[in-house]
Image (spheres, rainbow, N blue to C red):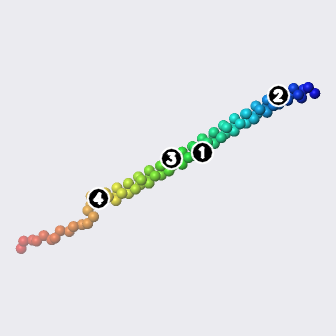
Amino acid sequence: MSEPLRGQPDDDAQRDFEQRALRNVRGLLDKMEDEERSDRASTVRIAVICGVVAVVMLILVVAWFANRKDAAPASVVIPAPAKTPK
């Protein structure tokens, strides 16, 4: 009968140790999940910034092509026929 009484503090110590270990594991898991959420948010933010930059560059290229002066004139000018001496 004295053995169960002597074993009781060891069981409590073991239980406390296990609970502390579980809390530590849960804390680490929470920290990993927070980092993963942060990484996902950063990835989305970078993708949005790249998309905005691409759209702005596309608009600039289209505007540049629209305002570009071509070597050939847009309209053809036909000179009047030259008068020949008779």
Circle 1 Cα neighbour tier, 10 Å, few/some/many (<14 / 14–19 / ≥20): few
- Residue 84 left/right relative to 42: left
Mark 4 or 3: the one toward you = 3
Q: Which residue is mark 3?
A: 46
The disc at residue 70 is 4
Compare residues 31 and 56 and report the one nearer the observer: 31
**Residue depth check, mark 4 versus mark 1: number of the one nearer the observer:** 1
**Picture layout, residue 85 above or below residue 58:** below
Give the amino acid type for the residue marked by disc 3 in the picture. Ile
Q: Nearer the viewer, residue 86 or 1?
A: 1
What's the amino acid at mark 4? Asp
State the quadrant of the N terminus: top right
Which residue lies at the image location 57% right of the left edge and 46% below the top edge? 40
Figure check: 22 above or below 68:
above
Apparent side of residue 35 relative to residue 83 in the rendered image (left or right): right
> Rounded to the nearest whole Å, what is the CA distance between mark 4 and mark 1?
52 Å
Q: Nearer the viewer, residue 44 or 12?
A: 12
C-alpha gap between disc 4 and disc 3:
38 Å
The quadrant holding residue 7 is: top right
Q: Amino acid at mark 1?
A: Arg
Q: Earlier in the sequence, mark 3 or mark 1?
A: 1
Q: Which residue is mark 1?
A: 37
Of callouts 4 and 1, which one flags the residue occurring earlier in the amino acid sequence?
Answer: 1
Report the disc number at residue 17.
none
Q: Residue at x 77, y 32 (%)?
A: 16
Residue under label 2, please give it: 10
Is 29 placed above or below 59 here? above
**Amino acid of disc 2:** Asp
